[in-house]
Image: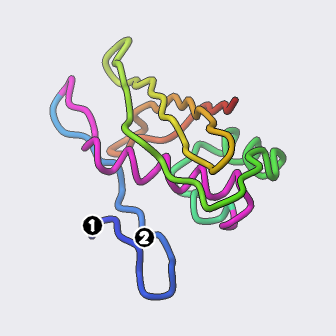
């Protein structure tokens, strides 16, 4: 399943699976994850769309966070910058264009079984 925006505007997210040690998820999939997170934090999508992409603790933080991005137009995620501080962990950030003011999203993903899950996120 490839990530795409459907006819009804729903964002379909493909699982972030991993391969051999040191392998990173596809940058396009990371961008889609960041886009979905920006839309949730802007109050344009429900947090449930990310439930299976986050650890339980990070998902509960997302639900508690509510609307953190105030945007005059739908958020649009620019390029994703990532580093791998150790095998099985990725730290990434992306600029989110929101009209009058841009925001930055930072995420940490860790390998859990065969998927990458978001364990932490921040926005400014």
Q: Is residue 37 left or right of residue 32?
A: right
Where residue 84 sits in the image (x, y, percent)?
Answer: 34, 18
Query: As displayed, is residue 106 above or below residue 40?
Result: above
Residue for badge 1: 2
Query: As displayed, is residue 100 above or below residue 73?
Result: above
Neighbours of disc 1 within 10 Å: few (<14), some (14-19), many (20+): few
Name the residue rendered at 53%, 56% in the picture: 36
- Residue 16 is marked as none
Mark 1: secondary structure: loop
- Of residues 58 and 71, the one nearer the viewer is 71
Which quarter of the rendering shows the C terminus? top right
Which quarter of the rendering shows the N terminus? bottom left
Q: How many marks?
A: 2
Indicate whether residue 43 is drawn in magenta.
Answer: yes
Mark 2: secondary structure: strand
Q: Which residues are magenta?
A: 21-46
Residue for badge 2: 12
Name the residue rendered at 35%, 24% in the picture: 88
- The quadrant holding residue 55 is top right
């Amino acid at each position: 399943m490839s990530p795409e925006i459907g006819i009804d505007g729903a964002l379909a997210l493909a699982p972030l699976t991993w391969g051999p040690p040191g392998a990173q998820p596809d940058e396009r999939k990371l961008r889609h994850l960041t886009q979905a997170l920006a839309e949730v934090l802007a109050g344009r999508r429900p947090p449930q769309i990310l439930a299976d992409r986050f650890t339980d603790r990070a998902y509960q933080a997302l639900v508690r966070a509510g609307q953190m991005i105030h945007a005059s137009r739908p958020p649009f995620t620019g390029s994703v910058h990532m580093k791998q501080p150790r095998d099985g962990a990725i730290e990434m950030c992306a600029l989110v264009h929101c009209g009058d003011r841009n925001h930055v999203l930072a995420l940490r993903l860790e390998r859990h079984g065969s998927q990458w899950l978001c364990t932490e996120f921040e926005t400014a």
